[in-house]
Amino acid sequence: MAVYDNLNHTYDSGVSPSVIQYFERKAQENIQPQLIHLRDAQMRTLPLNNGRTVNFHRFVPLDAITTPLSEGVTPAGQTMTETAFTALLKSYGGHIEITNEMDLYMLDDMSKAAADQLNDQAALSLDTIARDFLNAGLNVQYVDGANNTTRATLLATDVLTSAEIKKAVRTLKRENIKPFPDGFYHAIVHPNVVYDLTTDSMWTDIAKYQDKAKIEMYELGTMYKVKFYESTNTKVFAAQTYIFGSTSSIVASANYDATTRELTYDASISVDSARDLTGRLVYVRYTDSGTHDTLMCVESVDATAKKIKFRWQPASSVTNNWTTAKTLTIVPTGGGVADVDVYSTLIYGQDAFGTVKLANNGNVSIDIYPPGGALDPHKQRGVIAWTVKGFCAVVLNDDAIVRIESGATA
């Protein structure tokens, strides 16, 4: 890391303050645009010397006034009602070690390359944290909802269409969720879903925009008052082929004991496989006029007695169906039917979620440590690190986010 040698630096020997400032400025410039899941978040300033929490708020809309004013009488004033949210701030970071020989002999500037890689990692990390928060909402819409009431039944042919988008917009409008100032709700969509969505006759591509000067980064087009942004980091509920080993399911007998929470199965499972199954989330499935899945967690498996014990007891209406069903099947959780990946498309309006500002109070830092120090007496290793001192993502209004789950054309 000799390229940064500058003895004018006063706090990290051998690194100029201007170099640190340059890389921190580049980090903020490069990270923020890549945070597509936070592009419309309600922003808060990182609090200094004020604890590890940050506060967000959402105002409750005022009711309609239907009583006419009386002559000469001033009506009573109204009170604004606010819903407060408190989020816990956490720190995140990563680093790369660069040896003196790598820096000396490599043709490329490895320190700069490492800093660029760390910038991308920081952006991906924060966007992934936010993505998982936004996808934890309960306002979910399964494609072809008449036939799909859970993720586990979705097929690859259950692709996203304009009809599903229209249904999601209806859900938002019904809850009086405001669109953004551009007049649109916003959506984050995976490239595999884009492949299907853009073939719909209702799709308007950005190439057809009249004012192309206002096209934003990652923007693809519009449909039914929804503006779409593409991201490869969109949530994908990956298909899980196997419960353990090469076994994708266990066909169980109908002998369920509600007292012990044990289900007897008729497969042969080794002791090692039983250990592998323990602690997993699985679906207990039975079929009559349709497919019914109940999410359960395996507490233990007795490979000798062929019994599966669950950690909780489902409702009696569920266990009654289990005992009357001819067969029960234990299948893995994850994506849809038969190895199908399930894709999340988020459609949301204003004030749906919040986060803290990155370019604030030194929140994003890039630290460069040249070779040397007590643990590096031969000056062989330098370190470049990124740190976000405080970060959070919080859903402020679950009604303002619709998660559409769909398959996608292979």
Image (tube, rainbow, N blue to C red):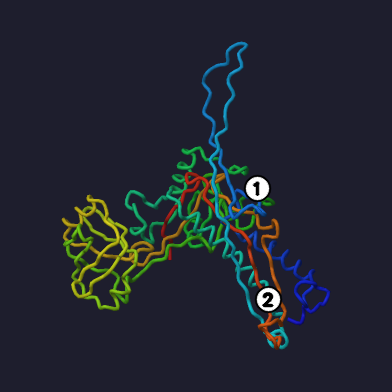
Q: Which mark is residue 56?
A: none
Q: Residue 210 carries which label?
A: 1
Relative height, residue 202 to residue 252 (above, below) = above
How much space separates mark 1 and mark 2, taking CA atoms?
A: 40 Å
Q: What element carries label 1?
A: loop
The quadrant the N terminus occupies is bottom right
Amino acid type of the residue tagged 2 in the rendering:
Ala
Residue drawn at point x = 50 percent, y = 45 percent: 397
In the shown orientation, is residue 133 left or right of residue 342?
right
Residue furthest top as drawn: 71
* Residue 169 spot, x, y in % from top left: 48, 44
In the shown orientation, is residue 159 left or right of residue 103?
left
Q: Assess disc 2: are there few (<14), some (14-19) or many (≥20) residues with their C-alpha within 10 Å of its C-alpha.
A: few
Relative height, residue 257 to residue 275 (above, below) = above
**Mark count:** 2
Q: Mark 2 points at which residue?
A: 113
* Residue 365 spot, x, y in % from top left: 68, 65
